[in-house]
Amino acid sequence: MPIPIFNSVASFFLKRRIGQIELFKDYPIEVQQEVLRKLVVYSIDTEVGKKFDFKTIRHYNDFKERVPIVAYEDIYKDIERNRKGEQNIFWRTPIKWFAKSSGTTNAKSKFIPISFESLEDCHYKAGKDMLSLYFNNNINSQLLAGKCLRLGGSKDIYEDNSSYYGDLSAIIIDNLPFWAELGSTPGSKVSLISEWEKKVQAIINESINENVTSFAGVPSWMLSLLQQVIQQTGKENILEVWSNSEVYFHGGVNFDPYRNLYKKLFPSKDFKYFEIYNASEGFFAIQDQNNSDELLLMLDYGIFYEFIPTSGSEQEIVSLADVKLNVNYAMVISTNSGLWRYKIGDTIKFTCLNPFRLKVTGRTKHFINVFGEEIVVENAEKALSLTCELTKSEISDYTVGPIFMGSKTKGSHEWLIEFGKTPDDVNKFMEILDLNLQRLNSDYEAKRYKNSTLEIPKLQIARKNLFYDWLASKNKLGGQNKIPRLSNSREYIDELIKMN
């Protein structure tokens, strides 16, 4: 079938899904209630189902009162039993895939169970929905006339006790249906190369002559790949390499610090950016409008959502029916992989309740609160974005750690920043950043008032590729590995400064 005809036919079938999306937008609470009912009924005869008497659960309140909220550490032993071959522990069908996730760069590895239902009804369904929503917003798109340059799966799939583990992206690529593989570059063999630098070169070699129309991957790693494409081709920007490029689907980290760098790579007002929100535990939300910073919560992926106000306690947890606008929530999920009331460690806030749209605001464990300042990632990255705009500078990577009080000195924050474009006056940059943080966070402002507790933050300028080299030293290149942005200790920043 000629490529243009394939694009037309495929886009027609993708648009048919929009009707189902409109249905859960119109009846969100009912759809979520049905998701919970199906999850509970399906798992009645599992160990978890018997332990909490799933067969007598009739309503959300029964579920809420009976099943405890858990973190990974609480269910680690059961997951290890499952990895060793025991089944029917928390999900009825056999689970043989486990997404290896560190969450943060130094954390102990987690092994998140991935069921067949989760792959089909969550991750692959979300991939199709991502395209459906894009086509719905861009009716003349020729996206499927070319290929998507994907970046993920930086580790091999490993076998252990008849189960398999690796990056979620590697698991997804390894199980992709043939039609999805045909529309992607590079092929799965190159996509699953373990060694990062060898992988990047192989991607460039295989994809450089393809008609690439879209890109998908974590912004920090995609940026590294695209910069090497520019370097090797001698072109001014990516549109000179792949002239039919339309869109970049991104997720995994906040995009704001990278936005200006990508605008230089894709210097066209018509090039689009679509954000997704997924994790090893599931696929949660997709940008459903052009030029938006809000994500539509996807309600029919076999995931039941609950939310804990970050300013409150677990007893204040609510379902979707009772969330409020602009409240910071920690998200709790129950899934079709057998995670029950599981805290994923992300924080979000709802920007719209009809339909339910949200923004990801950070991680429950990524903050600085050494001096009562309660700076979260959202504050830091918004302040950076505003400061870069005012100072005409660009940032590639950063991390922040505390400077602890001494017997005669006050506390402060130390920022280690790798600039893509260094500001003309770095002292002025820090003054503006400090003021922006004060405007965004009243607790920080109070601690900075007349230098009462905190002095103005300090800046260390990172050499080029410092963060890349640091990750390489920990064998953490590629995939979902991320720089820890904020920390209450100096563990990360001291290591990085030593390498600097």
Image (cartoon, grey):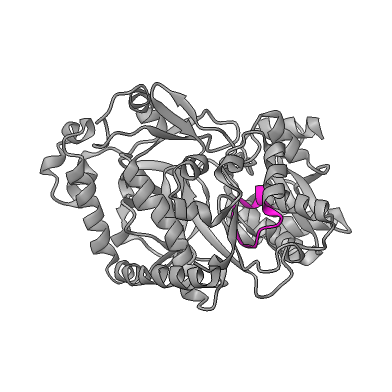
Left or right: where does residue 275 sit relative to residue 202? left
Q: Confirm whether the magenta stretch covers residue 296.
A: no
Instruction: Give how far across and how far down residue 117 sits, in percent.
Output: 32, 46
Quadrant hosting residue 270: bottom right
Residue situated in front as seen by the camera: 93 or 22: 93
Quadrant hosting residue 391: bottom right
Q: Which residue in the rendered view is the most extreme toward the bottom?
A: 140
* Residue name at image x 85 percent, y 53 percent: 427
Residue situated in front as seen by the camera: 425 or 105: 105
In this rendering, the answer to whether 341 lies above or below 425 is above
Instruction: Give how far across and how far down residue 65 sits, in percent.
Output: 21, 43
The quarter in which the C terminus is drawn is top right
Left or right: where does residue 448 sit relative to residue 157? right
Q: Can residue 276 be seen in the rendering of this structure?
A: yes
* Residue name at image x 53 percent, y 57 percent: 183
Residue situated in front as seen by the camera: 467 or 179: 179
Q: Which residue in the rendered view is the most extreme toward the front?
A: 1
Instruction: Give how far across and how far down residue 292 sits, in percent.
Output: 54, 70
The magenta segment is 207-222
Q: How many marks?
A: 0
* Residue name at image x 61 percent, y 39 percent: 370
Q: Can residue 354 be seen in the rendering of this structure?
A: no
* Residue name at image x 50 percent, y 72 percent: 5
Left or right: where does residue 327 sit relative to residue 406? left
Instruction: Give how far across and how far down residue 318 sits, in percent.
Output: 31, 53
